[in-house]
Image: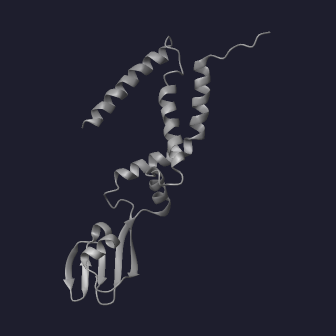
Amino acid sequence: MAKKKTPFSFQIRVIHRYLGFFLAGIMFVYALSGILMVFRDTDFLKTEVVTKRTLAPNLTARDLAPIFKKGAKVIKKDGAILYLRNGDYNQETGVANIKRKQLPFILDKMEHLHKSSTKSPIYFLNVFFGVALLFFVFSAFWMYTPKMPVFKKGMYFAVGGFVLTIILLFV
């Protein structure tokens, strides 16, 4: 008896289903970190962390820029103490108090995973995840045959999503 050939659309559905289950955790992380990244210019869920460092004495505001980063602008000077946007620096002793806002540990790790680049040792996982998401996009169109009502209804949703995407790109 000849073995019955499984339709291509059924094979795509099976791959789509199990790849979806496999990537559910990372999709959760990317969704949550993506939402958090919308608020990255606010202090939402961030706590203030103060770091005390001993630097060389008599540094100027320009010398402090790489250490204090965006908050290196001097707001006022009181004797030997320079008050900056995110801390202070004593020019006589060299002691600097650097204030930064940071997310809780696990949320910070999630955000860094989301923002990783080729300098990250796990960037290939982000590439794999991106390719898997592209597979989800294209496989959705091969899960059902064009004759099926669910495919035709799906095309209306796809066109609506495409139009929404174009609108969001230009807003």
Of residues 84 and 27, which is closer to you in this image? 84
Q: In which quarter of the image is residue 52?
A: bottom left
Which quadrant: the C terminus? top left
Spot occupied by residue 9 in the image (x, y as percentages of width and height): 57, 19
Q: Residue at x 47, y 17 (%)?
A: 151
What colour scheme does the image use?
one colour
Name above or below for residue 81 compared with residue 23. below
Q: Which residue is drawn at 24% across and 88% down?
A: 80
Q: Which residue lies furthest to the right in this view?
A: 1
Q: Quadrant of the N terminus?
A: top right
Closer to the camera in the image, 46 or 119: 119
Q: In this view, does 129 lie above or below 50?
A: above
Q: Is residue 13 left or right of residue 52?
A: right
Q: Tell me: residue 78, above or below residue 119.
A: below
- Percent position (x, y) of residue 82? 25, 81
Residue 2, x across and y down, in percent: 76, 10
The tally of labels here is 0
